[in-house]
Amino acid sequence: MSLETELAPHPAQRQAAISDEFVAYCNAEFERRRNSGEDFDEAAYKEAMEMALVRLRQLEEEGLA
């Protein structure tokens, strides 16, 4: 068994992945909604995404996410 599989990832690496995954999810959801043909408030979506991302990054910096 290698050392990489025995140790958990460093918190900074794990934290970056959480916010990166969140951004990727939000971008995919944004495109899905935009292309759905239904009414979609793009500005409100982007604003909500940014607010959530700011909070998530704050939690990451504190080691809580």
Image (tube, helix red, strand yellow):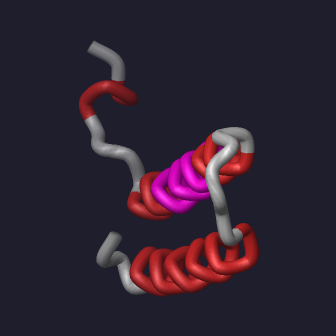
Indicate the quadrant where residue 64 lies.
Answer: bottom left
* Of 6 and 41, the residue lying toward us: 41
Residue under the image location 52 percent in, 56 percent down: 22
As drawn, 31 above or below 39? above
Q: Residue furthest front?
A: 38
**Residue 42 lies in quadrant:** bottom right
| Magenta residues, dominant SS class | helix
Residue 23 image position (x, y, % from top left): 61, 56
Check residue 26 for magenta coloring: yes
Q: Is residue 31 above or below residue 1?
A: below
Q: Is residue 4 magenta?
A: no
The one of 34 and 23 positioned closer to us in this rendering: 34
Magenta residues?
17-28
The answer to whether residue 24 is seen in the rendering is no
28 left or right, relative to 21: right
The residue that appears at 72% across and 49% down in the rendered structure is 34
Q: Position of residue 5 (x, y in %)?
A: 31, 25
Query: Residue 3 is drawn in which quadrant?
Result: top left
In-front residue for pair 55/33? 33
